[in-house]
Image (spheres, grey):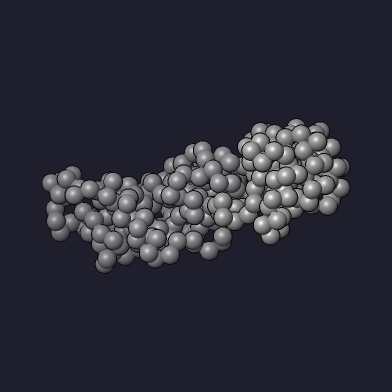
Amino acid sequence: MAAFPLTDAEVDAFIDAAFAEDIGDGDVTCATVIPERAMLSATMNARETMVLAGLPLVTPIFKRLDPDCTITMLVADGDKVAPGTRIMRVEGKARALLSAERTALNIVQHMSGIATLTRRYVDLIRNTGTILLDTRKTIPGLRKLGKYATAMGGAQNHRMGLFDAVMIKDNHIAVAGSVETAIASAKAAGRNDIQVECDTLEQVREAVTAGANSLLLDNMPPAMLREARAIVNGRIPCEASGGVNLNTIKAIAETGVEYISVGRLTQSAPAVDIGLDYA
């Protein structure tokens, strides 16, 4: 998902919702403090090292309130920038730009936070051959934007939703009765994209024997991951997940798993510090 993922209609809907909760029926501060004809020139500035994401939303956010404002982008999504970097410049009606400021900053800070954390993980496994994946652990309503941000950080997008592929987890196995039964049911429905979550080496054996197309090796320490990989013997790809953090990811990647997925990329990445400063 390297291309910006929202359609024009989705961007409009996003801005509608954001302005409804922030501006409501009017920005009373701007209406009472800022002269109607006042103009503003400002720059959006990075206040820490970060990887940028979300900039395609900035222009439509500001132009919603001031269609005639002038915006100059100075960097692009995916760029890693240092503190003090000027990200963009905007000039236009002061009331409009100040009313839109928080919405623009919030989304770029959030998405750039995801991209920045993602890049840290990617850098740690860059020479291992293992690919970093994102997950469905996203803020409801912001999945496309969250996954786009991980792509800007260097991860590969994985399963946009439940509709993408069969993912048989522990609760599915419990209800179906066994790994073999769950896989057989999916195959009977004509699926050939069956991934099975395995917590034990016995489940790994069952899933491979029953014809799974890939495995999610959940919360396995490196030594156990190596055993699982030996059982699989290269027949299907393996994804490690659970217990993955900046301190553990390299050791996990060095076991030879093809993929590692990290939920915290989109679930709990801290926002970065970006300001809009009068210029």
Q: Nearer the viewer, residue 27 or 222?
A: 222
Residue 193 sits in quarter: bottom right
Image quarter (top left, top right, bottom left or bottom right) of the N terminus: bottom right
Q: Residue visible at 32% across and 50% down? A: 18
Residue 132 on image: x %, y %: 66, 48
Residue 176 on image: x %, y %: 66, 41
Q: Nearer the viewer, residue 28 or 201?
A: 201
Q: Residue visible at 66% across and 45% down? A: 168
- Above or below — where is 143 with respect to 221? below
Q: Is residue 123 left or right of residue 77?
A: right
Q: Residue visible at 14% across and 53% down? A: 35
Numbered disc total: 0
Q: Is residue 224 visible?
A: yes
Residue 120 on image: x %, y %: 61, 43
Q: Residue visible at 76% across and 34% down? A: 200
Q: Is residue 28 left or right of residue 76?
A: left
Residue 157 on image: x %, y %: 60, 54
Q: Is residue 117 visible?
A: no
Q: Nearer the viewer, residue 112 or 160?
A: 160
Q: Is residue 24 left or right of residue 77?
A: left
